[in-house]
Image (spheres, coloured by chain):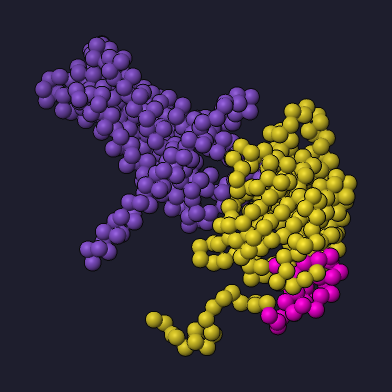
Chain colours: A yellow, B purple
Amino acid sequence: MSDSDSSGIENSDNDGNFIEVRDLTFYRGDRVIYQNVSLDIPRGKITAIMGPSGTGKTTLLRLIGGQLKPDSGTVKVDGKHIPNLTRKELFALRSRMGMLFQSGALFTDVSVYENVAFPLRVHTNLPEDMIRDVVLMKLHAVGLRGARNLMPSELSGGMARRVALARAIALDPDLVMYDEPFAGQDPVAMGVVVQLIRLLNDALGHTSIIVSHDVAEAASIADYIYVLADGEIIGQGAPDEVLHSDAPRLKQFMQGLPDGPVPFHFPARDLRDDLLAGVK
Amino acid sequence: MVIQVLRRVGSKGVSFLESFGASGMFLFQSLVAVPNIRNNFPLLVKQIYAVGVMSLVIIMVSGLFIGMVLALQGYNILTRYGSEQALGQLVSLTLLRELGPVVAALLFAGRAGSALTAEIGLMKSTEQIAGLEMIGVDPLRRVIAPRFWAGIICMPVLAIIFSSVGIWGASLVGVDWLGVYSGSFWANMQDSVQFSDDVLNGVIKSIAFGFVITWIAVFQGYDAVPTSEGIGQATTRTVVYASLAILGLDFILTAVMFGDL
């Protein structure tokens, strides 16, 4: 476990990494999201990406998925440098990925059943009865088999995210990226989702990335944790190490302390100056 | 001051060219692919229904009233010269050459074009487009291409229906109401309308309009800022740009087809 000045690459086993990010720099306009960030996602493990809001955790998933291109640095998924892939190669690689979006991103014009069946229909030639079996098993795993005929507009936020989870794992992909999988879940569903992610990972041996604010839940199932803030990695390691770290920034985030070096406020001028400036 | 104005004009020009280039690339990537009939045909049929069949009512009702008004106005003018028997000729040539393709295209831009932009913009804002990408499905092929082809297929059919209903409306007013002799109404129309000059040119115009409207609509939707305001602005842009493009393109096509250039 280390603080901000370390990339953590020293301990990584390159052959065992499904994703390798090196010297990643990414800007949104003039705002730095990542500055020379390097990290590894080990194959077959659950890696949690944590950090304060607005630090670019979802952006990292989009960079890994090739929806965004880095300003500099490399992003390799299973040995393939994502920004260099052709459109066709990128889509072929994405068929081996599953992503749970924060919003669910369900297709609103088709039912829950059809949403989960969609990846199976476009990427396989399975007969309809087999597609039905797979869809029902995936929906059963997230507790929504009975909701298969509902339309996405009839679901709550938490239910929509569980359907999206079923869709993300429909093809049993090599990599599953979960963006805030625990948000909006009631305690029962939360427990099931936590258990399900761990179970899927162990049973199918795929690689999982969880982006989450929920420290306890993410730490309970993650094999490795990265904590991001201010465009860099402020800490990383096994959950126990990160949870009990004395590094000030890490400790503040993991324990949810209001005061500390991690800023609560978005960068701004001094409050006093701002208030006294008046309306110009 | 002058420098600032020049800079602003230059900046707008560059921005326009960038946007035009991006929309060209967007169209190229959407359409240049090996056709997959098994997967794409059902999507195309669905879009033909949404874009074409759902536009039928507005097209038919508008065509009927425009034909009726045209007959009424035409009759009033032609009777001054004792030429009311030429009403069929006037109505049919006006509708087939100009009003059919142009008004149907304007209605199509307002009804189907705006709906396409709003639908694709909303798919973007609700991350459905991103969801497709991450499932490994190219949204340009899955979402854009079927809508684009549906627009091109539907537009000439709608224009033909518009003109046909318009001619029928004109006959209702001219023949059944105002008493123009039906034999001269239909015979003059049959004599004066040339298939290649009038009908075919009208169809070619409407195919061109369908291409432009759908291109603008799908690009504006795909390029929309994914907020409610952004989608509203994109929808407005679709209607404004498409309407201007239709009228400008109509002049060019008319000049080429009928202007002896």
Pick the front one: B216 or A136: B216
**Residue A144 seen from this side:** no
Q: Is residue A149 magenta?
A: no
Q: Is residue A143 left or right of residue B186?
A: right
Q: How many marks?
A: 0
Q: Quadrant of the C terminus of chain A?
A: bottom left
Which residue is pictured at 61% across the width and 77% down the height? A265
**Residue A134 seen from this side:** yes
Q: Residue furthest front?
A: A10
Which residue is pictured at 48% across the width and 48% down the height? B223
Instruction: Give the quadrant of residue B6.
Output: bottom left
Q: Is residue A255 magenta?
A: yes
Pick the front one: B121 or B187: B121
Q: Which residues are magenta?
A: A233-261
Q: Is residue A61 above or below residue B75?
A: below
Q: Is residue A149 left or right of residue B202?
A: right
Which residue is pictured at 77% across the width and 67% down the height? A236
Q: Is residue B16 left or right of residue A225?
A: left
Q: Quadrant of the N terminus of chain A?
A: bottom right
Which residue is pictured at 64% across the width and 71% down the height? A230
Pick the front one: A236 or A270: A236
Q: Position of residue B83 (x, y in %)?
A: 15, 19
Q: Position of residue A58 (x, y in %)?
A: 66, 58
Q: Is residue B143 left or right of residue B202?
A: right
Q: Is residue B138 above or below residue B188?
A: below
Q: Position of residue A164 (x, y in %)?
A: 72, 48
Q: Is residue A119 above or below residue B225?
A: above
Q: Position of residue A65 (x, y in %)?
A: 66, 49
Pick the front one: A156 or A124: A124
